Amino acid sequence: MDSAFITDNADSWDMAEGSPFTDLIKVLLQHIAGDAAAGKYARNPFSSIQVYLRARVIYNTIQDLIEEVETSDNADWDAFDKYTSAIPPLETILFEFHGINREDQRNTILPSNNGSIQEAISFIHAWEDDRKICMKVLRDLSGEVFTVLSNDARKHVVAEYETPLLSDDRTIVAALNAFFMDDQLNGQDIDQQILSEVTTGIRQIGGNLMKFLTSPPPVRSGTLTSFPMANVVIPIKTMMLVYILFAMIQLDTILPGLWDYLKSSTIWQATKEHVQKIRIHTDTITDIKSKEDLEELEQEWKKVEQLLLNGDAICPPLSEMVELLQLAARIPRPFHGRSVELIRMLYTLNVYSNNPADNATNRRPELRRLMVETIDALTPASQVTSDVKAFSASSSEYIKLDSELTGVLTKIEEAFETFNLSNELPAMENQFNDAVKVDYDHFCLMKNNLSLDV
C-alpha cells in the first residue's frame, strides 16, 4: 500500500474551527463523519472514511491559507486565489458524495430479503452507483485545484484510491462467500445437477474474487493505474443476483406461484449459463478486459435480472375470480350455462396473465376491471326468480339479461385479442354458443313438462 494512504486514527478526525466562508464545507464534513460513524455507508465504509479524511485535509489547508491572507502585511494574492478557487469544487464534490447516504442502505451490505425481487435488485444497482460515485469523488479530490494548495495536501489527496474501494468489495464478497458456504437449497424441488453447477460456480467466483482483492495490486508511479478495477463489478453483481434467487426460495412467506417460478428450469438454466461465463471471466480477472467483453457480460447479467424481475409480477389470486366461481352456482337456467362459459374464459385469461413467461402480467389491472363488469352483469342473472311459472324467455327481463351477457362476451373476446390469445377464441366461442342453446333448450323442456308457456 502506498505510504501516502491516509489511515483512520483519532487525530485524523480533528477539524479546524474554520471561517464563515467555509461553514458549508464544515457542515457537510460533519454530516459525512456522523453518518460514517453510524454505519450508514454500509456498502462503502472504507471509501466513505477516505472521502471524509481527504476532504478534511483540504478543508484544514484552506483554513491555513485563509490565516496566511489575514495575517499577511502584503496582499497575498497567491494564497487568496488558491483557497477561493478550491472552495466551490470542494462543496460540489461533498454534495455529490453526501447524496449516496440513502435510507435504502439500512446498515446492511447484502440485498434485502423481504419478498420483493424489485427491491432486492435495486440494492445491486444502488451499490454499483455508489461505488462509481466513491471512485469519482476520490479521483476528483486529487484534482489540480486541490493539489496546488500545499505540498502536504498534495501528498494526501493524490494517494491511491483503489485500496479503500477494494476493501469495500472484499467485505461484500466475504459476506456472500459465507452465505454460499452452506448447501442452501438441498432438498428443494430443483434440478440437482444444475443446482450443483450453480453453487460450485458461485463458490469459484467468490474464491477468485477474494484472491484478486487480497493480492498486492500492481503499482505504477504511486497509483494503481494498471489495476483492472472494472473486472470485479460484474462478478459481484452476479453473486448478489444468485444470492437473491437462493434467499427468495427459502422465504416462508413467498407466494406459491412465485416459489414455483423461481425454481423453474427457465430460471436455473439461464443462471447456470451466466455463472459459467462469469467464472471463466474471474479465472483471468487480473487481465485487462476490453470494454466490449465487459459489456457483453453485462448484457447477459441483465437477461437473468429480467427473468427474476418477472417473478414480481406474479400476483395473489384475484378476489374477483374467487367471487365469480362462487357466483356460478347461484345462477339458474336459462343463464347458468352461458355464465359458466364466460367464467371459464376469464379463468383462462387469469392463468395466462399470472405467468411471467407469457409477458402479460401488466394486463392484470385490465383483467380485474373486466371481471368486475362481468360480476355486475351476472349478479342480476343470479337474482332471477326460481319460480319458472313467473319467468319466460320472451319477457323483457330475459331479453335484457341475454343482451347484457352477450355484451360481456364481446368484451372478453376483445381481451383475448389484446392478450394475444385469439387462437383459443373459436373453441371457447363454440362452447359459449352451445351453452346458450342448452340453456334455452333445457328451460323450454322444463316449461313443456310443466305445460307452461315458454
Image (cartoon, rainbow, N blue to C red):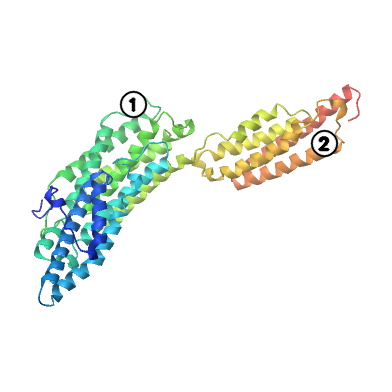
Give the residue drawn at x 87%, y 36%.
Answer: 395
Residue type, label 2: Tyr
Q: Image quarter for residue 200?
A: top left
Among the two numbered marks 1 and 2 on one chain, the one whose residue lies closer to the N terminus: 1
Instruction: Give coordinates of residue 448: x percent, y percent.
Output: 89, 25
Q: Specify whether residue 44 is in view.
A: no
Give the residue drawn at x 36%, y 51%.
Answer: 299
Q: Out of 415 and 119, give the one closest to the viewer.
A: 119
Q: Which residue is mark 2?
A: 398
Note whether 377 is above or below 151 in the view shown: above
Q: Do the residues under discs 1 and 2 have CB atoms within 8 angstroms?
A: no
Q: Which residue is mark 1?
A: 186
Q: Image quarter for residue 235?
A: top left
The secondary element bearing badge 1 is classed as: loop
Give the residue drawn at x 40%, y 36%.
Answer: 114
The secondary element bearing badge 2 is classed as: helix
Give the residue drawn at x 30%, y 34%.
Answer: 199
Q: Which mark is residue 32?
A: none
How crowded pointer 1 is (Cα within 10 Å; few <14, some 14-19, many 20+) is rated as few
366 horizontally vs 161: left or right: right
Residue type, label 1: Asn
Query: Residue extending furthest bottom?
Result: 75
